[in-house]
Image (cartoon, rainbow, N blue to C red):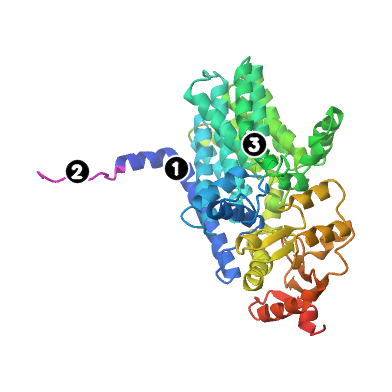
C-alpha cells in the first residue's frame, strides 16, 4: 500500500529451503550434537543440585585468568600478580571478551556449543569441496561427533572444540591453496596466515600442523610462502612468551613446562630429538596405538591416489598426507594409549579420522544412492569400521569408563566445595593448594600453587629438581600462607609436606572418582597456631556439605 515501508527483513522461504537442501547433513548432525549435549547437561544438573559444573577443574583456570584480566587488568590466576599459566591464550582471551558485560560460568559452555555446531559445518564444507557424496558426508560427520566424542569436550569448558574448528578451517584453506598458491598480497593468503596464527594460539601443538604446510609449500617451490606462513603463525606465540619473560616468568607457560615434555625437548640435541620423534614413535605405533590403523589407511589411500592420478598436491591427497604427518608427530607428544582426562589431547586427531577417510574414499563412492551401488557402500563401510576399531575402543573408555557427567559430580563434591569453604572463611587469605581452578574463580584468595601451574617459583623448583620438603616450607613461609588444601599423596615423591603443618581435617568423596587427582583433600594449618580457627571454620561449614562428602580429622573427632 502507498506510504507503507518495506520491512527491513523478510523471511525468504526459497533461500531457507535451498540452504537446507545443500547443508542437510550438517543440519542433521548439528541437531544430534545439541541433543547429546543437552542430555549430558541435564544429567549433570541433576547430579549437582542444579549447579552448572564443568567436567574439569582446569576450565576454571581459564575463567579465573579471564575474569581477572577484565575486572583487574591482570592476566593471572589471581588478581594479585601476572601468571603465564594458560597453554591456550586464544581460548582464555575469548572467554575474557565474553566477560566484558560480566563474568558468568555459563559463557564457556555457550561458546563451546556454538563452536561445536561450527565444527560440524566446517567439516561439511571441507567434504563438500572435495566432492564427497552426501550420504558419506552424513556418516563421516556423525562418526566425528560420536567418536570424538564432541559433547564431552563441550562439557569440559576447555579449548578443545576451538582447536578442532581451527584445524578444520586451516586444513580446508591450506589444501585449497596448495595446488595453486596465490600471491602473498592476496586475501586468500592473508586468511591462511590468520588461521595459522589462531591455530597456534588455540593450542601450541597446532603449530605442527602449520609447520607441515610450510614444508608442503617449500616442496612446491614456494619457499617464501612457506617461510611467511611459519613466521606469521608463530609470531603471537613469541609475543606471548616475551610478555611472560618480561613479567618474570618463563617463555613457555607453566602448564607446558610441568605437564608435558616441552621443557625436556627445549634443551634436547638432534640425536635426542631423533630418538624421541622417530624411534619412540615407531615403538608406540607398533603397540597398537589408537591412530595406527587410521595412519596406515590414510597413507595407503594417499599412495593409491598418487599412483592413479599423479597429482600429490590436489586437496584430497594433501589432506591425507597432512593427517599422516600430523598424527606421527603428535603420537609421541601425547601419552599412550589415550592422553589426558577424557583422552582430550588427541581428540582433535580423532575428529579428523572419519573426515580423512571420507575424503580418501569419497571420490570412488557413487554420488547417488542406487541398489547397484550397495556393494561399494558396503566395502567402504567395512573398511572404515575396521580402521576405526581402536578409535571405538577409545570412545568406550571416554563414554563409559571416564564419563563426563560423573566428572562434574567429582568437581562439585570436591573443588566446588573447597571454593565455597574459602569464600565463607578465607576469601582474602593466602592459601596453598594443588588444584587451583574453582578455588580461584569463585574467590579472591592469594593462591600459592604447590603444583607449579600458578606459581613460577614452584614450577622452577620442580623442573630444576630442587623441590622438596624444605622448599615447600620456605615458599609457603615467604608468602605468609595461612592454610593449605592439598592431596597429601602428591607430595610423597618430594619428601612429603612439612611435618609441623597440622592436618585439621579431610574431605573424601563418597563415590569412586572418575577424574580427581585423589579422592581425599586434607586441610592443613600451615601455622600450628591457626589450627583451632581452621577446625572451628570447618565445623561451621560442615552442615552445608553435600552428602557425597565424607568428613574426618580432628575437627570432627573433637581432638586438639
The residue pinned by badge 2 equals 6
Foreground pick, 381 / 409: 409
The local secondary structure at tag 3 comes to helix
Quadrant in the picture for residue 304:
top right
| Residue drawn where x is 87% and y is 62% of the image | 496
Q: Is residue 134 shown to the viewer in this render?
A: yes
The local secondary structure at tag 1 comes to helix
Residue ranking furthest to the left:
2
Quadrant in the picture for residue 493:
bottom right
| Residue drawn where x is 70% and y is 28% of the image | 300
> Would residue 18 appear left or right of 341 to someone viewing this image?
left
Q: Magenta region's main secondary structure?
A: loop
What is the crowding at mark 2: few (fewer than 14 residues within 10 Å), some, or many (at least 20)? few
The local secondary structure at tag 2 comes to loop
What is the crowding at mark 1: few (fewer than 14 residues within 10 Å), some, or many (at least 20)? some
- Nearer the observer: mark 3 or 2; the answer is 3
x and y, in percent, of residue 270 in the image = 83, 28
Residue ranking furthest to the top:
221
Find the magenta span and give its range: 1-13
The residue pinned by badge 3 equals 237
> Marks 3 and 2, how far apart in space?
50 Å
| Residue drawn where x is 78% and y is 36% of the image | 266
x and y, in percent, of residue 156 in the image = 62, 55
> Would residue 522 appear left or right of 80 to someone viewing this image?
right
The residue pinned by badge 1 equals 24
Amino acid at each position: 500500500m502507498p506510504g507503507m515501508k518495506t520491512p527491513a527483513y523478510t523471511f525468504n522461504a526459497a533461500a531457507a529451503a535451498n540452504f537446507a537442501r545443500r547443508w542437510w547433513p550438517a543440519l542433521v548432525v548439528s541437531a544430534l550434537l545439541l541433543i547429546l549435549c543437552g542430555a549430558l547437561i541435564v544429567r549433570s544438573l541433576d547430579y549437582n543440585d542444579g549447579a552448572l559444573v564443568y567436567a574439569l577443574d582446569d576450565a576454571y583456570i581459564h575463567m579465573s585468568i579471564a575474569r581477572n584480566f577484565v575486572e583487574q587488568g591482570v592476566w593471572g590466576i589471581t588478581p594479585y600478580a601476572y601468571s603465564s599459566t594458560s597453554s591456550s591464550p586464544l581460548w582464555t582471551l575469548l572467554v575474557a571478551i565474553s566477560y566484558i558485560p560480566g563474568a558468568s560460568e555459563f559463557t564457556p559452555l555457550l561458546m563451546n556449543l556454538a563452536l561445536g555446531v561450527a565444527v560440524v559445518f566446517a567439516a561439511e564444507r571441507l567434504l563438500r569441496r572435495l566432492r564427497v557424496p552426501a550420504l558419506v558426508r552424513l556418516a563421516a560427520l556423525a562418526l566425528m561427533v560420536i567418536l570424538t566424542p564432541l559433547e564431552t569436550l563441550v562439557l569440559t569448558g576447555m579449548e578443545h572444540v576451538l582447536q578442532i574448528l581451527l584445524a578444520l578451517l586451516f586444513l580446508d584453506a591450506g589444501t585449497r591453496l596448495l595446488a595453486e598458491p596465490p600471491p602473498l598480497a592476496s586475501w586468500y593468503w592473508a586468511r591462511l596466515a590468520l588461521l595459522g596464527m589462531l591455530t597456534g594460539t588455540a593450542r601450541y601443538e597446532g603449530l605442527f600442523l602449520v609447520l607441515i604446510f610450510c614444508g608442503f609449500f617449500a616442496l612446491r617451490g614456494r619457499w617464501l610462502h612457506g617461510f611467511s606462513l611459519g613466521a606469521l603463525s608463530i609470531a603471537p606465540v613469541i609475543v606471548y612468551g616475551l610478555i611472560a619473560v618480561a613479567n618474570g616468568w618463563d617463555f613457555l607457560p607453566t602448564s607446558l613446562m610441568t605437564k608435558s615434555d616441552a621443557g625436556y625437548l627445549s634443551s634436547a640435541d638432534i640425536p635426542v630429538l631423533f630418538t624421541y620423534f622417530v624411534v619412540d614413535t615407531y615403538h608406540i605405533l607398533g603397540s597398537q596405538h589408537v591412530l595406527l590403523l587410521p595412519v596406515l589407511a590414510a597413507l595407503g589411500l594417499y599412495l593409491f591416489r598418487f599412483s592413479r592420478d599423479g597429482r600429490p598436491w590436489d586437496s584430497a591427497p594433501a589432506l591425507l598426507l597432512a593427517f599422516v604427518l600430523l598424527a606421527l608427530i603428535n603420537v609421541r607428544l601425547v601419552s599412550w594409549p589415550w592422553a589426558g582426562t577424557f583422552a582430550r589431547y588427541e581428540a582433535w586427531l580423532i575428529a579428523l579420522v572419519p573426515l580423512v577417510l571420507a575424503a580418501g574414499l569419497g571420490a570412488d563412492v557413487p554420488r547417488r544412492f542406487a541398489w547397484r551401488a550397495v556393494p561399494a557402500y558396503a566395502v567402504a563401510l567395512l573398511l572404515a569400521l575396521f580402521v576405526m576399531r581402536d578409535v571405538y575402543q577409545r570412545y568406550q573408555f571416554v563414554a563409559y569408563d571416564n564419563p563426563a557427567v560423573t566428572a562434574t559430580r567429582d568437581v562439585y563434591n570436591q573443588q566446588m566445595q573447597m571454593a565455597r569453604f574459602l569464600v565463607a572463611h578465607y576469601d582474602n587469605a593466602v592459601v596453598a593448594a594443588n588444584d587451583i581452578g574453582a578455588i580461584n574463580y569463585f574467590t579472591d584468595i592469594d593462591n600459592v600453587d604447590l603444583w607449579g601451574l600458578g606459581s613460577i617459583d614452584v614450577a622452577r623448583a620442580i623442573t630444576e629438581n630442587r623441590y622438596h620438603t624444605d622448599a615447600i616450607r620456605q615458599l609457603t613461609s615467604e608468602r605468609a600462607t595461612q592454610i593449605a588444601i592439598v592431596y597429601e599423596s602428591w607430595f610423597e615423591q618430594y619428601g612429603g609436606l612439612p611435618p609441623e603443618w597440622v592436618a585439621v581435617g579431610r574431605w573424601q568423596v563418597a563415590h569412586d572418582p572418575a577424574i580427581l587427582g585423589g579422592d581425599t583433600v586434607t586441610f592443613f594449618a600451615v601455622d600450628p597456631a591457626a589450627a583451632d580457627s581452621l577446625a572451628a571454620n570447618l565445623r561451621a561449614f560442615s552442615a552445608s556439605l553435600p552428602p557425597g562428602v565424607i568428613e574426618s580429622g580432628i575437627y570432627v573427632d573433637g581432638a586438639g
